[in-house]
Image (cartoon, rainbow, N blue to C red):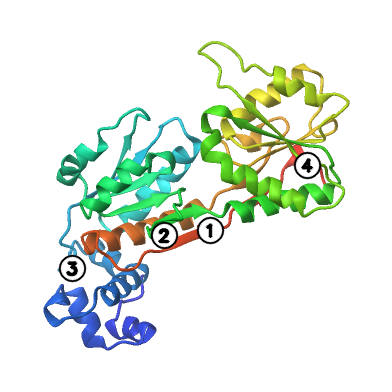
Amino acid sequence: MRKKFKNKDLAAKLGVSGTLVSLVLNNKADQHGIRKDTQEKVLNLAMQMGYFEALHEKNETSPVEEKPGVLGMIVPSLNDQFVIQITPFLQKAFSSIGVGFSIVTKDPDDQRYDRLVGAFKKFYSGLILLGDAADDNTIRALRTADYPFVLLEKSIKSLRLNTVSTDSAAGALLVVNHIDKLGYKNIVIIADRKFFSADTTAIQDVIDAFGQKTGIHKPVVVELDEPVAGDEIDFVKFEKFLRPPYRADVLIIMNASLVYPIMTFIRKKKFRVPQDIAVVSMEEGTGFDLMFSPVTCLQKPLSGMSAKVANMIWSEVKNSGKGKFKRQVNISPELIVRNSCGAI
């Protein structure tokens, strides 16, 4: 049975009065001059403690929940493993606070988003911008309109924005430390040319992490072009690193979508995984645990990221996009070790 929510418990955790908590939860904070940042702290903790979820179970609504009921997420493509994987977690996070959730795809050549902000306001109370969907024009248009939004898997150092991202440097260190323990020396990093610009930071994090190790050669970076429909990936640039003089010990694959075609290719060339060459993916992919051999990979903290995004965008909506707190959250991934990289 859910523990009964008490204002005094929340007040004690925040070091404020029970009256202040009551005013915030009853949507009277502005009338009594309670600061916006204090309101945000109260509402965020109330949500974490299950206040709103308990009300929804009783078919009740808090006075503070005067907001549109749908949040949108703009994504560069629906054919993205991360979108597929995180969507159920986001749906769960938003449904727990009684908010709907919808996904919008963005054409990379579409320059109309600055004119669509007005239309978005009719349908969405706030937006999540994923990766390359958070381009300069879109961010500028949303900020100018004080539109509530949060960036997911995208950071812009020159601006104070709410962002939630996987800690790329921490993930790179997990992978590199594991490879170092296995004794591999020749490393090939493989990336999809289509996503190379978005992966530049993550690739550099891997290279920098290897730079801290002695006895490991500087990694070679190979970009592969996405195949035309019905064709296979052109592996010419990559194949030469499977044999002397370089002879790769391990392949670090940046994009989950490349793992299956690369594994298929190296098997056709009579290479065994991991006996002849090891494979590590920097992203989790569907069925990686069922492949032959099961693929070692970094697993993003989907549940934690979804909870942080829900907290941030909810606060932004409550503050009409003018919240004073702008948080940059980086969450470390987990290394899932499977057979494809060999055993320590």
Residue name at image x 65 percent, y 34 percent: 290
**Amino acid type at mark 4:** Lys
- How far apart are the alpha carbons under marks 1 and 2? 10 Å
Residue at image mark 1: 331
Which residue lies under the disc numbered 3?
64
Q: Which residue occupies the extreme left position in the image? A: 31
Q: Residues within 10 Å of mark 4 (few under 14, many from 20)?
A: some
Query: Where 200 sits versus 77, above or below?
Result: below
- Say if mark 4 contacts mark 1, CB within 8 Å: no
Identified at 71% across, 30% down, the residue is 292
Disc 2 is placed on an element classified as helix
Can the viewer see residue 339 in this picture? yes
41 or 145: nearer the viewer = 145
Q: Earlier in the sequence, mark 2 or mark 4?
A: 4
Residue at 37% across / 58% down in the picture? 161
Tag 1 and tag 2, C-beta contact below 8 Å: yes
- Above or below: residue 95 compared with residue 7: above
In the picture of the structure, the residue carrying the numbered disc 4 is 218
- Callout 2 amino acid: Lys
